[in-house]
Image (spheres, rainbow, N blue to C red):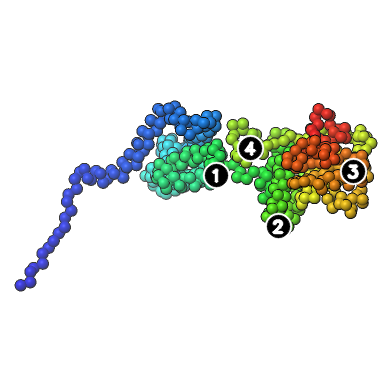
Amino acid sequence: DTPKAQLVRVQDPEISPLALAEKVLGPIFEPLTTVGIVLVVVVFLLLQREDLRNRMIRLFGSSDLHRTTVAMDDAAGRLGTYFLAQLGMNAAFGVIVGVGLWFIGVPNPLLWGVFSALMRFVPYIGAFISGILPVALAAAVDPGWSMVIAAAALFLIAEPIFGQVIEPLLYGHSTGLSPFAVIVSTLFWGFLWGPIGLILATPFTVCLVVLGRHVDSLEFLDILLGDRPPLTPVENFYQRMLAGDPDEARDLGEAMLKERSLSSYYDEVALKGLQLAANDYARGVVTPAQLENIRASSRSLVEDFEDHEDVEPKGDGKAVNPNETPTLAERTHFKAEAVPGQAATREGLPEAWRGETPVLCVAGRGPLDEASSAMLAQLLRKHGLGARVVPHGDVSRDRVRDLDVTGVAMVCISYLDITGNPAHLRYLMERLRRRAPGVRVLVGLWPEDERVLGDAAAGKEVGADDYVSSLRGAVEACLKAAGGLGEERAVA
């Protein structure tokens, strides 16, 4: 016989009260447990902060206590600024929410403003969570939908503006982080540690940036995450010239001229950038087309600054923070002062200096020496001395006899690079002496090459009356020769 089918019923065992409580309260207590552990650790860190500080100094920086102390002070100052900025931002958000709910008509707007300010310390989701209760209350007290929509719109508009626009800019400015680094660090630490990582993302990243600013081997952290320009002004100048973009080079130059003189900009930025180009051309990495771009951009830059006086700015530029730690590249880039002197009127100058162009700026044989001569001639004109530029081809053996030296009282020869034995410079000096006997000759190397002409005595050996290593020094030497600069202020 076929057995009858049996009815089978599977019945789950009854859940005990303890298991039910664990199932319901587990998702709530797990984050609270994590927060409690963090709070306990923070309390003990604060109680033992002096001891931990000394241990960190002993571990990482006992060999250089000064740098370690400066680094720790820098980190503490930036973190303090960040926490104050965060407190101010959250308080402002709470005020806006409270005032907005008061205008909308939601009951107890002060309570919801304080609650929103506190909840906003939870990154990204805290502000929206704080909006659930006032929106629900608006739905309960208003028979229509206007109050609910207005309350929801208040949170949906205010939080993105604060969180996605104002905060990255404010936190980046106050902590030394770029706005992009604030976003990326939040994503990274949030992925790594969850909600706790969201809270600690910015403080941890600030510490990494401080390490990059004070530890040479970790400078890449400051370059990647910091808010300071990654390229030095010299590198920026060279890169824009190499790309054939004189407009952006001019923008960068005008920004620097707000805090330094034109002669300082030429000496410390333009000439050093041109020397980088000359060195790369000598190594064969700059093509003739790129070299022509650099020449054209240099001529355009000098023409753009024709109306700019060589004077110290009146302090409207960015103030220098004495506590700010410069990058490794910025430590080699300093600000020189403007040329202090001015030539006398033509009637007050010596007879030899009363011509239209008493100074002849001769370019060396390098590919970019004519650009440096143009800068020197422009600075001389700004200080009351007429000057004109002569290309190197006009002082060659075949053409030097045709050189017009009428009214010339001084010859300035410019070189960006003169490596090796400078025999051609001595031959050039001989040709100029024969063509213009008795005329004072100045040799300038921008910047100074100590391997060839390490001092003024070495300059004398090639037949020069003056030897300088900056445009500022060349202008002062010319003013001194013309009687327009006192001995005590002249720099040879």
Residue 99 in the image, given as x and y percentages of width and height? 48, 38
Q: Amino acid at mark 1?
A: Phe
Q: Are marks 2 and 4 in contact (CB under 8 Å)?
A: no
Nearer to us: label 3 or label 2 = 3
Q: Earlier in the sequence, mark 3 or mark 2?
A: 2
Q: Earlier in the sequence, mark 2 or mark 4?
A: 2
The residue under the point 20% across, 43% down is 17
Residue 267 in the image, given as x and y percentages of width and height? 74, 41
Q: Amino acid at mark 4?
A: Arg
Q: Which residue in the structure is indicated by mark 2?
A: 287
Please tell me whether mark 1 sits on a helix, a strand or a loop: helix
Q: Amino acid at mark 3?
A: Arg
Q: Amino acid at mark 2?
A: Thr
Please tell me whether mark 3 sits on a helix, a strand or a loop: helix
Q: Earlier in the sequence, mark 1 or mark 4?
A: 1
Q: CA distance from mark 2 to mark 1?
A: 30 Å
Q: Earlier in the sequence, mark 4 or mark 3?
A: 4
Q: Nearer the viewer, residue 10 or 208?
A: 208
Q: Earlier in the sequence, mark 2 or mark 1?
A: 1
Mark 1 Cα shell of 10 Å, populated few (<14), some (14-19), many (≥20): some
